[in-house]
Image (cartoon, rainbow, N blue to C red):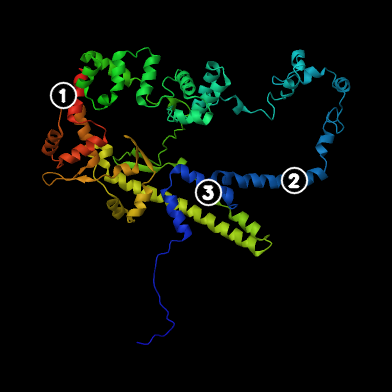
Amino acid sequence: MAISTKLEMRQSQSLVMTPQLMQAIKLLQMSNLDLVSYVEAELERNPLLEKSDAADTAPENGAGSEAQAEQAPEASEAPSASGADEPGSGDWMQNDLETGSEAIASRMDTDLGNVFPDEPGVPASPDPAILKAGDSYKNISSGGASEDYNLEAFVADETSLGASLEEQMHLALEHPADKLIAGHLINSLDENGYLYADLGEAAEQLGVELERVEGVLAVLQTFEPAGVFARGLAECLKLQLIDKNRFDPAMEALIDNIELLAKRDLSALRKVCGVDEEDLVEMIAEIRALDPKPGSVFGSSLVQPVVPDVFVRPANDGTWAVELNSDTLPKVLVNQTYFAKVIKTARNETEKEYLTDSLQTANWLAKSLDQRAKTILKVSTEIVRQQDGFLTYGIAHLRPLNLKTVAEAIGMHESTVSRVTSNKFMATPRGIYELKYFFSSAISATVGGDAHSAESVRHRIKQMIDAEDPKAILSDDTIVKILKDDGVDIARRTVAKYREAMKIGSSVQRRREKNARL
């Protein structure tokens, strides 16, 4: 077979991910906070974009300013004739202002204090004591506040854990070397107040004896909040008990064998601590009242409240009304007038190309935001239609639902539905839920009935365990039997998996714990 080169023309179709399409996909899965940040960045970058609220008032303000500019020359050229004819207009309102108070008072035939009384916010005359203060009086303006007045300077700053410990350190320690060691240990704390640094390495790094570092640490462990500078959970609880004067031999034995408490082996704990069942219950209650993370009360990260993207309310006809939260939807407009005005003054092709690209980007962003809102509303409406039983009767009637079912119902791809439900929340009469909450796997029924939602089955298991009699603890096999009698075909390992996911102990652990509370 001869090998030769030749030219061929072929026509084919392929899906190409353009940058704008990729950005539209990212917009779809953004949360409302991320979307607002993105739009704010675009407003700063693109001169043809503007907020809708600012755009509504801009033409009025602009028209007013132009009208004033047109009238200004006329007013300056033609003096007011009415002002010259009115009687008394030339008595004291003259072009040449007089600065002498006596001359003005003589023409007005009264004292200036009767005509221009002192305003409440303006001091008539400074106090001599204030004048002696020097610059402090200079900060007082006629309106009661100067231009440099900053209200935020009076807002209390949040105290961090390190700052609080440093204040206590300067009071508790005197020697500069001890303060240096204490500062190093304070900087080695984690956000929960635990010290995981090796004392030997710290002593070698600072060039001091290990005993001195341990002595400084002993002082630091007496600081507030109680439990800081602990090197483990057991030591943290020990320090807090010492601060409460409750660290007796029985408590010491309990802390040394805290792993038995984690296993809920109460009988072994009673033997180790040498106490009866009633005393052990009181000791466990004291342990639970302690703070395992004492440093977390300082400098906690800002918790952003959940803002729903969709509201669901009952309608008058018995259905559900679904509407978007307009506060979470950024509104932008494209300033076509400004583009038409500026494009005429472009000096070269580079400027024209920049303006054209900005116009295309602005139009694309406005359309993408509108399409995003419509898609969220469409998906949310279908979810509400599918989960009508949950909204009406509660979690026990939550239906199994997957992305494919919603995608087929609204004529979209599953990936689109998945992106829409990411980081989006729905406010319902039963609370605020993430859209992904309504999607759960199906558990088949025993006698050919409707499948059950995995979330509703988990809820039923939790209800059964919470209501169980301490003298008749339900085992996983018993829970399986009860559920199968109710028409839920579920395996024992599935019950155990759901129970562990809800952080519920086994039947043996629950029996020990509930019997100890009696």
Q: Which residue is mark 1?
A: 469
Q: Confirm or deny contact between disc 1 and disc 3 (CB under 8 A).
A: no
Residue 6 figure quarter: bottom left
Relative height, residue 407 to residue 300 (above, below): below
Question: Secondary structure beneath disc 1?
Answer: loop
x and y percentages locating residue 397 in the rendered image: 22, 39
x and y percentages locating residue 380 in the rendered image: 35, 46
Q: Nearer the viewer, mark 2 or mark 3?
A: 3
Q: Specify which label sits upstream in the sequence, 1 or 2.
A: 2
Q: Which residue is mark 3?
A: 332
Q: CA distance from mark 1 to mark 3?
A: 60 Å
Mark 1 residue type: Asp
Q: Quadrant of the N terminus?
A: bottom left
Q: Which residue is mark 2?
A: 71
Residue at image coords 39%, 73%: 12
Question: Secondary structure beneath disc 3?
Answer: strand
Mark 3 residue type: Val
Question: Which residue reaches farthest bottom?
Answer: 2
Residue at image coords 57%, 45%: 56
Relative height, residue 243 to residue 361 (above, below): above
Q: Confirm or deny contact between disc 1 and disc 2 (CB under 8 A).
A: no
Answer left or right for 53 relative to 111.
left
**How many residues crowd around disc 2 within 10 Å: few (fewer than 14), some, or many (20 or more)?**
few
Residue 505 figure quarter: top left
Answer left or right for 108 relative to 474.
right
> Is residue 394 something that shows in the picture?
no
